[in-house]
Amino acid sequence: MDRTLANLAALAHLIDAYWAGGCVRVIRTGAVLAIALAQPAWADIGRIKLASGAASIERDGKVLPLKPGFVIEIGDTLVIGARGKAGATFIDNTRLSAGPGTRMTFRSFDYNDTTQKGRFVSFLKKGAVAIISGRIARNDPQAMRVETPTNIYVIRRARVVLNVK
């Protein structure tokens, strides 16, 4: 209730400033605020939801242990040890589960939340992953790829399990 009253007071202040001749300043301030709110978190492409055992991300030469809520960025390599596992959800709602011995790099990820279109390319060097495709694959069947040392798999609105030895 108090927050609603504060919001109404702030709105009343903006209206008063507009009618007092400060309309240009109010519009400019509003435009800057709108631009700031519209900018995505560039690096954040997904988050770890589950991690157990030996599970980490290699980023810029550093090994970072995984825990729920960990932010995944473009260029990260997911490394799962012999007794580990991890699960992640990406911002387009793609879900990924990685089993023991997995090494997967997220090479590129581009997603527009408004149009729900984009591109997602990853490289599975070894291990097993299960993928449930999200909005990127739903809107363009050629936009999501998993590359391996021997093949390229295009993920099309599907649930897929890949195992690379």
Image: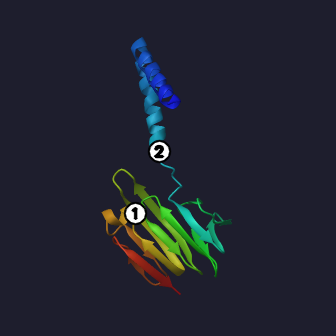
Q: Is residue 76 visible?
A: no
Label 1: how many Cα within 10 Å (few below 14, some 14–19, many 20+): some
Secondary structure, mark 2, is: loop
Label 2: how many Cα within 10 Å (few below 14, some 14–19, many 20+): few
The residue sitting at 41% across, 57% down in the picture is 111
The residue sitting at 43% across, 61% down in the picture is 93
Mark 1 residue type: Arg
Secondary structure, mark 1, is: strand
Give the answer, above or below, for where 90 lies relative to 79: above
Give the x, y percent position of residue 42. Answer: 51, 52
Q: Earlier in the sequence, mark 1 or mark 2?
A: 2
Colour approach in the figure: rainbow
The residue sitting at 64% across, 69% down in the picture is 56
Residue 58 sits in which quadrant?
bottom right
Q: Is residue 16 visible?
A: yes
Mark 2 residue type: Gln
Give the answer, above or below, for where 30 lies relative to 38: above
> Disc 2 marks which residue?
39
> Disc 1 marks which residue?
119
Give the x, y percent position of residue 103. Answer: 57, 76
Give the x, y percent position of residue 149. Answer: 49, 82
Residue 38 sits in which quadrant?
top left
